Amino acid sequence: MKRLLLIPLVLFVACEKLEITSQVAVQLLYDKNYIFLDVRTEAEHQAKAIPNTTCIPVQELTNRLNEIEKFKDKNIIVYCRSGNRSKTATKILIENDFKAVNLIGGIKEWNGPIASGK
């Protein structure tokens, strides 16, 4: 019986939360401990983006990690259009020792300020 109780505890501790909602993320937009990373294309970023965010397309991320090395001490909120590309990017970042979470629903679900037409 004790073993059955310990197994769920171990699994719970081993699971990290890799996602964040727009409602929570919008409160962190100006927090110096967080940065936002857009992993859509540069054209998508230019058309509509969360303000003051860096853009590195997901397909280029592995080769461009050096550009965000300075943010290893920050919490990175990763976003794309709907959350699929950013989910992949979040995994890449975590595998490379970054602290990253995926913005659920991407910019489509974002409830905060928007920069457009850069």
Image (spheres, rainbow, N blue to C red):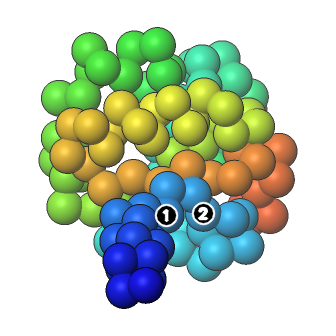
Residue situated furthest front in the rendering: 1
Where does residue 46 sit, x and y in percent of width and height? 65, 27
**Number of the front mark, 2 or 1:** 1
List x then y, in percent, for residue 27: 60, 78
Q: Write the residue at 39% across / 71% down.
A: 7
How many numbered dots are placed on residues in this image?
Answer: 2
Name the secondary structure under disc 2. strand
Q: Amino acid at mark 2?
A: Ile
For residue 106, side relative to residue 57 (left or right)? right
- Visible residue check, residue 32: no
At label 1, counting other C-alpha atoms closer than 10 Å, the crowd grade (few under 14, some 14-19, many 20 or more) is few
Viewer-closest of 48 and 40: 40
Q: Residue tagged by mark 1?
A: 17
Type of amino acid under label 1? Lys
Give the camera-side residue of 9 and 57. Answer: 9
In what element is the residue under mark 1? Answer: loop
| Side of 84 where 108 appears, left or right | right
Tell me if label 2 and label 1 are in contact, CB under 8 Å: yes
Residue receiving disc 2: 20
Residue 95 appears left or right of 28? left
Kindly tell me whether residue 7 is visible in this rendering: yes
Where does the C terminus fall, quadrant-wise?
top right
Quarter of the picture holding the N terminus: bottom left
Which quarter of the picture shows residue 15? bottom left
